[in-house]
Image (spheres, rainbow, N blue to C red):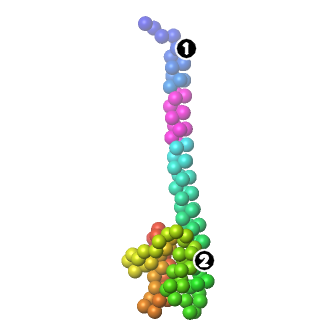
């Protein structure tokens, strides 16, 4: 059985259309996943900045104590329960390290490379 030239062209063009549509679908899926990770990262950084801006006035007070700083952090973080890990008290997106006198000496994010 011999196929007509037009039939072969139609099959090749149909296959090219399906392949190109699959390629575009893959690009769209990748863009959606990338946007999701970008939005999540933006939200975490936005929350951390809001928490830090709420804690700065409490921490800048010369009479600030560990409790006053953590109270401001809890108020800014909302429902997040604080916990201690590796010398930091983690509240929300930020970890706070205090010296022996209860003064804030370092603030770190959970994703910080430092």
The total number of labels drawn is 2
- Which residue does the image show at 52% across and 44% down from the upper left? 29
Q: Is residue 9 above or below residue 46?
A: above
Residue 88 drawn at (x, y percent): 43, 78
Circle 2 packing at 10 Å, graded few (<14), some (14-19), many (20+), is some
Determine if residue 93 is in view.
Answer: no
Residue in the image at 47% along x and 71% along y: 81
Nearest the camera: 35 or 51?
51
N-terminal of the pair, mark 2 or mark 1, is 1
Q: Image height check: is 54 above or below 103? A: above
User: As displayed, is residue 52 above or below residue 104?
Assistant: above
- Provide the secondary structure element on which disc 2 rests: helix
Q: Nearer the viewer, residue 68 or 21?
A: 68
User: Which of the two marks, 2 or 1, is nearer to us in this view?
Assistant: 2
Q: Which residue is label 2 attached to?
A: 54
* Location of mark 1 (residue): 6
Q: Position of residue 32 (x, y in %)?
A: 55, 48
Label 2 and label 1: CA atoms lie apart by: 71 Å
Residue found at x 59% / y 89%: 61
Residue 13 in sight in this render: yes
Residue 24, percent from left and from top = 55, 38
Q: Quadrant of residue 73?
A: bottom right
Quarter location, residue 50: bottom right
Give x and y (percent) for residue 82. Answer: 46, 74
Task: Looking at the picture, tell me which residue is in the foreground, 33 or 11.
Answer: 33
Instruction: Look at the image and say whether residue 107 sits in the magenta stretch.
Output: no
**Where does the magenta region start and end?**
16-27
Which of the 4 image quarters holds residue 10? top right
Quadrant occupied by the C terminus: bottom left
Q: Residue at x 60, y 77 (%)?
A: 54
Q: Residues within 10 Å of mark 1 (few under 14, many from 20)?
A: few
The dominant secondary structure in magenta is helix
């Amino acid at each position: 059985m011999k196929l007509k030239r037009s039939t072969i062209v139609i099959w090749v063009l149909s296959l090219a259309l399906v392949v190109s549509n699959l390629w575009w679908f893959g690009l769209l899926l990748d863009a959606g996943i990338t946007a999701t990770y970008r939005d999540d990262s933006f939200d975490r950084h936005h929350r951390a900045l809001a928490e830090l801006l709420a804690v700065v006035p409490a921490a800048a007070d010369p009479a600030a104590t560990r409790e006053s700083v953590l109270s401001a952090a809890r108020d800014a973080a909302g429902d997040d329960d604080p916990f201690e890990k590796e010398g930091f008290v983690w509240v929300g997106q930020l970890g706070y390290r205090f010296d022996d006198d209860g003064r804030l000496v370092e603030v770190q994010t959970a994703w910080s490379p430092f």
